[in-house]
Amino acid sequence: MAVKLMQGNDAIGWGAIAAGCRFYAGYPITPSTEVAEILSRELPKVGGKFIQMEDEIASMAAIIGARIGGLRSMTATSGPGFSLMQENIGYAAMTEIPCVVVNVQRLGPSTGQPTAASQGDLMQARWGTHGDHPIIALSPISVRQAFDLTVKAFDLSEKYRTPVILLTDEIVGHMREPVDLPDFKTIKIFEQEVTESPATYKAFRNTPDGVPPLAPFGVGYRYHITGLFHDELGFPTQRLDEIDPWLERFNAKLDNHIEDITLVEEDVQAGAKVAFLSYGASARTARHALKLARLQGKKVDMLTLFTIWPFPEKQVEALGERVDRIIVPEMNLGQLAYEVERMVGRKKVKRVGRANGEMVTPQMVLDAMEG
Amino acid sequence: MDETILKAYTQESEEALISQTDWFECSETLQKLSKKKKFPTIWCSGCGIGIVMGALIRAIDHLGLANDNVALVAGIGCTARMPGYLDFNTLHTTHGRALAFATGLKIARPDMKVIAIMGDGDALAIGGNHFIHAARRNLGITALVVNNAIYGMTGGQYSPTTPLGGRATTAPYGNIEPPFPICDLAIAAGATYVARSTVYHALELDKYLAEAIAKDGFSVVEAVSYCHTTFGRLNKLGTAVDMMRALKDNSIPKSALDRLPPEEQAANTKIVRGKFIDIERPQYTQVYANLITRVQGGEQ
C-alpha cells in the first residue's frame, strides 16, 4: 500500500478493519473520537456494523454481545469512559469473551483535561475492575505501531479469550506520521475452532493450553454464560471443587503463554550501568534522551515496553541485574515505576513522572541520570 | 399449541387455570425447552416469575422457533435468573445491561430472536437509559419486564415501580417517589409493540409474548407479578395466594376500560391489562442492512 500521512487514531481504525473487526460500539469522547469516526465510515464498506451507543457502559456491553454473536468487536474511549467500562471489562474477563478496548489516555482524574495527554490509566487498565483477573494491555509508541498493536490486540484476545486493552495516549493518538500499511490480506488473526459436538461442548472446560474454544451463539452450541462463578458448562456454582480448578486455569492462562504475549524492545549498550525504561509517548522522550546521552559519550541501555500487562517481569528483572539505575519517565506519578521497583528494588529506580498534561522532556530524563 | 389454550385466547378468558400438578412432568413442551437438571429454581414458593417463564416457553413453542435460533439475555435480579433454566443460547450479564448486551448480539445476528428478560429495577432504574434507547432505535428485541414492584433479590428495597406510599426496607415511611408506568414509557420512547398482563392471567401472557416475539421491532411485555416475600410482607398484602387473587380483582382488561365513561376511566386505579400499541416502524437491523447495501453500492 502507498505511504499515507495519518494519525494514531486513524491507524487504530485501520488496524481494526485489517484484523477483521466487524462490530464497533462507542460513545464520543476526546481524544479517542476519530477511531469511531473512521469506523463509522469504513465498517459498512466491508459489511461490518457500527453503532453509537447511549454511553460507554452500553458500548462495552454491546461489543461483548456482538462477539458472542460471532463478530470480532472493539470500542474506543478515554479516561472517564474507561472508568465507566470497568464493570463490563470484568464481565468479559470473567466470561472469557475476546474483545478489544482502546483507551486513548487523557489527563485525569475526573474530567481532567480532555485534550491533554497522560499515561494515568496504567493501573486502572490492570486493576480497574473488581476482583482478581487476567488482562492484557498493549501500548504503541508510533502511528505505525498503533496499527500493528491493534492487529496484535485482536490476535491475542482471540487466542487467549480475554479482553485486550490498547493503552495508547493522546500524543500517539493525535500525532501524524507517514505510514506504509501492509496489505490487509496478509494479516492473519487466530481463529477459534470448536471441534467438539454440541452434545459434548463445554465452553469453560480445561484444555491443555488452558484456553477452551469459544462457540458463538446461534450455531447449535447452546450454552450458558454468566458473570457468576460458573462450572465448565457455564452454570452458576458455589462448589469449591468446581470453582478452584476454574480459578486456577483462569488466572494462569496468560502466564502460561507469557513469551507469546510479551512484546518489548531492548537497546543494549555493552557496559552500561544506567537504563531508560518507558512505554507509549514517554518512550519517544526516552529514546530522544538516549540519543543525546550517547552523543555525549554516556553508556545507556533502553528497554521499551509494548506489552504493559501482564508486566514483562523477566525482562525488567534481567535489566535490573545488568544496571545500577533504571530511569522511568512516564506521564503519571510513577504507576509503571511501582512495578519496576517491585522487580528490581526501590533503590535502583528513579521516577521521572509528570501529570500536568505536558510530556516528560528529554532534558528531565538526562537530569535524572545526574540526580 | 394445546387446544384449550388456543380456545382461551379466542375467548379472552380471564379465568386461566394454573396447573396444580407437577407442571414440568406433565408438559412435553416444557421438557423440550427447559433444562430440567437446573431445577428447582431459586425463586420463592408462590413467586410469579415461574409463571412468566412458563408463558415464555409456551409462546416460543407456539411460534415453533428452533432453540438454536433464540437467545435469552438477562441482567441481574430474581427475574434475570430465568435464562439459566431454559435450553436456548442464554446470557446472564451485568445489572441493568441486558438490553445493551442484547443490542450487540442482535446486530451481530439479526436472524436470531433475542429476548431480554429483566425485572423492574434492572430494566428501569440502572438500565433505564438502555431501555429508552433500544426503544428509540426500534431494535428487533423483545423486552420482557417482570414487574414485582420491589428489589427482591436484595431483600425488598423500593424500585422505580414501587407504588407511591408503598413500604420497602429503604422506604420505611412509605415510598415518596411516583412510579414509572412501564408501558407508557416504552410507547413514548418508540417501542412498536407494548402489552401488559399479570401472572394471574398466564394465558394472556402467553399470547402477548408470542405476539411480541413475532414482532420485527422493539417489543415490550410487562408482566405484573408483585413479590409476596418482600413487597407483600412489608405492605401486609397477605399470602402469595391472596396476592394472586388481588391481581384478578384489581385489574381490568383494556377493552373493558375503554367502554367505561371518561370520568370512570380517569378515576381507574386498577392494573390495565391489554395491548397498548402494535405499529410498524423500520427495524434497526434492517435499516442498517440497507445502509450497508447503499454504501457498498458506492454511495459517498
Image (cartoon, coloured by chain):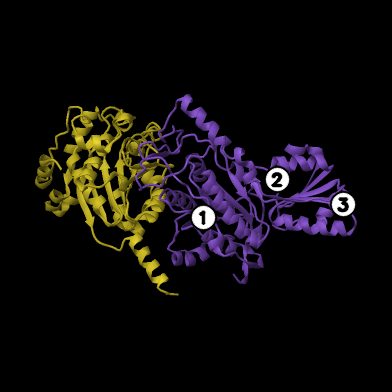
Chain colours: A purple, B yellow
Choose the circle earlier in sequence order: 2 or 1: 1
Residue A259 vs residue B191, the one in the foreground: A259
| Chain of the residue where label 1 is placed in the rendered structure | A
Which residue was labeled with disc 3?
A299
From where the camera sits, is residue B231 visible? yes
Residue B235 placement (x, y as % from top left): 30, 31
| Chain of the residue where label 3 is placed in the rendered structure | A
Q: Residue at x 16, y 52 (%)?
A: B263
Q: Which mark is residue A336?
A: 2
Q: Amino acid at mark 2?
A: Leu
Q: Amino acid at mark 1?
A: Thr
Quadrant (top left/top right/bottom left/bottom right) for the N terminus of chain B: top left
Disc 2 from disc 1: Cα separation: 24 Å
Q: Residues within 10 Å of mark 3 (few under 14, many from 20)?
A: some
Residue at disc 1, secondary structure: strand
Q: Mark 3 against mark 1, which lies toward the viewer?
A: 3
Residue A336 placement (x, y as % from top left): 70, 45
Choose the circle earlier in sequence order: 3 or 1: 1
| B40, above or below B178, in the image | above
Residue A23 lies left or right of residue B232; in this view the side is: right
Residue A143 vs residue A190, the one in the foreground: A190
Residue B7 placement (x, y as % from top left): 9, 43
User: Is there one chain holding both mark 2 and mark 3?
Assistant: yes
Disc 2 from disc 3: Cα separation: 23 Å
